[in-house]
C-alpha cells in the first residue's frame, strides 16, 4: 500500500515543484534505463520517459537516460551509472530485476527502483502493478463492443506478468457475457517478442480470421503491428501501457494504461526530498496505478452504457466487491 506521502505526491503529479525544491537539488542526479524496445516505443518505455520529462520540467533537475539494446548491457549500464554518482536509478521492465539485484549491493549509498518486477537489496524499491484490474475493465469494453462474442489477446512472452493481463481481460469479458470466447496467443519466448510488429500483425490477422473482432495486445512495440492489422481489416484494438488511442483513431477502442510515468516521477521526487523508501509497492486501481482511457480519439466508440458499466466495475474492484483473478 502507498504511504501517505506517496499518495500525496501521486495526487500532486501535475503540480510544479516550489522554487526551494529546485534549490535543494544540489548534486542530485537521477537516471532512467529503458528496456529493449526503445524510448519511443509508444508503450511502456515511453510512459517512463514522460514521467522523467515531467520531473525535469517541474524541478529543473536534469536526468540521465539509457536505452538498452542488448541484454548484456543491463548490468553494465547500472554499474556505470552508479559509479558516476547517479543518486537514484529507475530500471524499466521485469528483465532488469536480476541485474538490479546483482549491482545494488555493490553501491549501498545509491537508490535503485525497478518497475514491473521484484529485486533484492536493502537499497532497492520494487514497483509492481496489478495489471489484471485494468485489464478487467478493458475486457468489459471489449465484450460490450464485440458483435461476435469473440475477443482476442496477444501477449509478448508467456510470463506471469503477461498472464495477469490475459486473466483480467478474460474475466472482464466473461462478466458481460459468460459465453464470450477468448482467443489467446503469445508472440514468442525471447526479448525480440516485444519488438516484432510483423509477427504481431500476423497473429492479429489469424485471430480476425477465426471470428475475433477486437484484440487486446500486451506486447510492447509488437502491438503496433496488431493495431495496424486491425485498422486494415476494419476491426477494433485495445492499446496498452501508454494511451495509444491516437495511433489509429476509430480503430483503438481504448487503452489499458499503466502509470509508469507516475512511478518514475515519484521515484525521482522521493529520492530528492528524502522520502524514498526501499521495499515493495503494489499499484492497482485504488492507487491510480492502472486504468483505461477515454478521450477525443475513442469517445465515439464508448457508449454511455459501456462507460457506466466500467465505472461501476472500477468502484466494485476498489471496494473489494469484485476480486479480479491474476491467473
Image (spheres, rainbow, N blue to C red):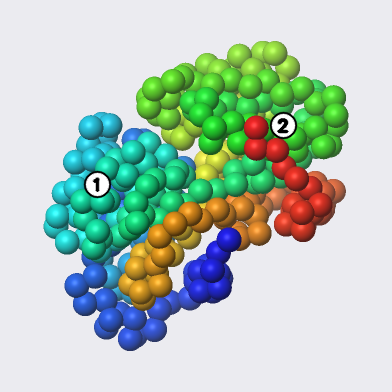
User: Eyeballing the image, is 179 above or below 255?
Assistant: above
Q: Residue furthest bottom?
A: 20
* Res. 116 visible in picture: yes
Q: Is residue 322 left or right of residue 64?
A: right
Residue shown at 66%/25% (left/top)? 152
Whole-angstrom CA distance, mark 2 to mark 1, is 38 Å
> Dot 2 lies on which element?
helix
Label 2 Cα crowd, 10 Å radius (few <14 / some 14-19 / many 20+): many
Where is residue 108 shown, x and y percent of the image?
24, 59
Q: Which mark is residue 170?
A: 2
Quadrant assignment for the C terminus: top right
Along the line of sight, the residue nearer the viewer: 158 or 107:
107
Q: Nearer the viewer, mark 2 or mark 1?
A: 1
Quadrant assignment for the N terminus: bottom right
> Dot 1 lies on which element?
helix
Where is residue 192 shown, x and y percent of the image?
37, 24
Q: Name the residue that disc number 1 marks.
A: 103
Where is residue 15 shown, x and y percent of the image?
48, 76
Along the line of sight, the residue nearer the viewer: 30 or 58:
30
Q: Is residue 151 left or right of residue 249?
A: right
Residue shown at 70%/38% (left/top)? 325
User: Eyeballing the image, is 196 above or below 259?
Assistant: above
Where is residue 158 shown, x and y percent of the image?
52, 25
Q: How many marks?
A: 2
Residue 55 figure quarter? bottom left
Residue 93 figure quarter? top left
Earlier-in-chain disc, 2 versus 1: 1
Amino acid at each position: 500500500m502507498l504511504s501517505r506521502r506517496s499518495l500525496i505526491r501521486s495526487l500532486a503529479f501535475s503540480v510544479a515543484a516550489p522554487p526551494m525544491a529546485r534549490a535543494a537539488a544540489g548534486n542530485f542526479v537521477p537516471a532512467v534505463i529503458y528496456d529493449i524496445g526503445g524510448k519511443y516505443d509508444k508503450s511502456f518505455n515511453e510512459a517512463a520517459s514522460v514521467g522523467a520529462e515531467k520531473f525535469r520540467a517541474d524541478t529543473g533537475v536534469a536526468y540521465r537516460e539509457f536505452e538498452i539494446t542488448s541484454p548484456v548491457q543491463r548490468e553494465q549500464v547500472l554499474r556505470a551509472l552508479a559509479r558516476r554518482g547517479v543518486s537514484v536509478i529507475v530500471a524499466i521492465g521485469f528483465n532488469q530485476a536480476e541485474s538490479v539485484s546483482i549491482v545494488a549491493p555493490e553501491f549501498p549509498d545509491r537508490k535503485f527502483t525497478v518497475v514491473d518486477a521484484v529485486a533484492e537489496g536493502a537499497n532497492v524499491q520494487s514497483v509492481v502493478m496489478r495489471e489484471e484490474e485494468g485489464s478487467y475493465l478493458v475486457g468489459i469494453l471489449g465484450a460490450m463492443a464485440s458483435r461476435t462474442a469473440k475477443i482476442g489477446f496477444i501477449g509478448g512472452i508467456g510470463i506471469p506478468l503477461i498472464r495477469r493481463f490475459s486473466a483480467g481481460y478474460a474475466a472482464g469479458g466473461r462478466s458481460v457475457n459468460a459465453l464470450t470466447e477468448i482467443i489467446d496467443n503469445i508472440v514468442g519466448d525471447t526479448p525480440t517478442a516485444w519488438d516484432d510488429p510483423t509477427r504481431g500483425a500476423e497473429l492479429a490477422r489469424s485471430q480476425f480470421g477465426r471470428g475475433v473482432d477486437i484484440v487486446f495486445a500486451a506486447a510492447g512495440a509488437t502491438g503496433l503491428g496488431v493495431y495496424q492489422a486491425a485498422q486494415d481489416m476494419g476491426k477494433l484494438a485495445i492499446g496498452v501501457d501508454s494511451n495509444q488511442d491516437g495511433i489509429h483513431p476509430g480503430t483503438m477502442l481504448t487503452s489499458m494504461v499503466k502509470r509508469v510515468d507516475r512511478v518514475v516521477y515519484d521515484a525521482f521526487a522521493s529520492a530528492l526530498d528524502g522520502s524514498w523508501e526501499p521495499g515493495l509497492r503494489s499499484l492497482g486501481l485504488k492507487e491510480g496505478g492502472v486504468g483505461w482511457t477515454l478521450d477525443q480519439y475513442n469517445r465515439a466508440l464508448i457508449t454511455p452504457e459501456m462507460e457506466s458499466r466500467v465505472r461501476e466495475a472500477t468502484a466494485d474492484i476498489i471496494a473489494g466487491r469484485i476480486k479480479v483473478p491474476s491467473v
